[in-house]
Image (cartoon, coloured by chain):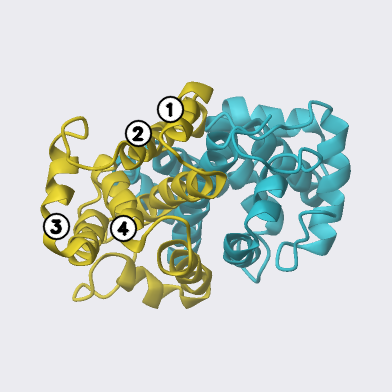
Chain colours: A cyan, B yellow
Amino acid sequence: MAHINVDENLPGIRGLMNFRPETAQPMNELAEVLLRMENSLSRGERELIATYVSSLNDCFFCQNAHGGIAQHYLQCDAAFIDNVKVDFVNSAISDKLKALLSIAGSVQKGGKHLTHDQVEHARSLGATDREIHDTVLISAAFCMFNRYVDGLGTSAPTDLDFYRNRGKQRAEEGYAHYDPKN
Amino acid sequence: MAHIPVSPEIPGIRSLALFRPETAKPLYALVQVLLRQPSPLSAAERELLAAYVSFLNRCRFCTESHAAAARSLYGNEAGLVAEVFENLDTAKISPKLKALLRIAEKVQQSGKAVTPQDIVVARNEGATDGELHDTVLIAATGCIFNRYVDGLDT
């Protein structure tokens, strides 16, 4: 049971977005720009950053929802995603993406945790200013989404197939015109 | 020096908004709805919540901006902003606002830190679903802005 009276048939952020559509709209627009619109980081890479930060924040709903979307884009299985969450340094992703995940992990702790050396390391591996900017903002954004979802005590399905199936749908439909009831 | 090339004359979030207007648009739209459009919480209370979370995140730019807005909106009672920063227990604010600030404090640490008991305390002081929702989302939104501004070292 969530801390406020939301439709319990709508898990995670969906019940909250249905409760307050006025705030849902700009949040979905932000997700659309950050995670789907034109970018030198692929949609799969961006969803992976979102998944990683959500796992650091221990947000079950968000890490599985975005993990499901990342699986769809990256055409990978749940084990690959789990490996990135627990040990990205030794996972089969590019060195640049590892450097960006390290940046995202520091921002998750707090903005001041990110060091100049981490940024320069990412740059030396080819990360652009905009990729660094977007990585910081994706991490910061999920520090908001995760707190929103867990701070109001929303429920989340425990069946992981639920997230995998919806991941495909969300990847296809996007966030901009998100209908929390669908 | 910021981590990315932004104008050094323009402080904080404004320099980032110029660097990436596509993300600035929904970010500002969210703040506009949360802090300015109709809510069961007054504009002063909402600015105080934003200032307090920024203060806890030690984000100077965001703390100063929202504290100034809160002081201006509180008018004759502007002094209570400093009281809240100094000691929330003794600040001369309503028990309901105090309970909501306590919830914001938990959200600043982690969403999972908010307990059913925190919610009961606020409800016993008269907090509604709408007030609880906006309190949690304002605190969560502080955590995106503070990390964005400080993460890029503006």
- Local crowd at mark 2 within 10 Å, few (<14), some, or many (≥20)? many
Determine which residue is flagged by label 1. Answer: B121
Vertical relation: A115 (above or below) A84? below
Q: Amino acid at mark 3?
A: Ala
Cα separation between marks 1 and 2? 10 Å
- Local crowd at mark 1 within 10 Å, few (<14), some, or many (≥20)? some
Cα separation between marks 1 and 3? 26 Å
Count of numbered marks:
4
Q: Quadrant of residue A172?
A: bottom right
Picture coordinates of residue B142, whole percent (x, y): 38, 51
Question: Are marks 4 and 3 in one subunit?
Answer: yes
Determine which residue is flagged by label 3. Answer: B78
Determine which residue is flagged by label 2. Answer: B102
Disc 3 on helix, strand or loop? loop
Disc 1 on helix, strand or loop? helix
Asked if marks 1 and 2 touch (Cβ < 8 Å), the reply is yes
Q: Amino acid at mark 1?
A: Val
Letter of the chain that mark 4 sits on in the rendering? B
Disc 2 on helix, strand or loop? helix
Number of the label disc, if any, that sits on residue B47: 4
Cα separation between marks 3 and 2? 20 Å
Cα separation between marks 4 and 3? 12 Å
**Quick check: can you spot residue B154?**
yes
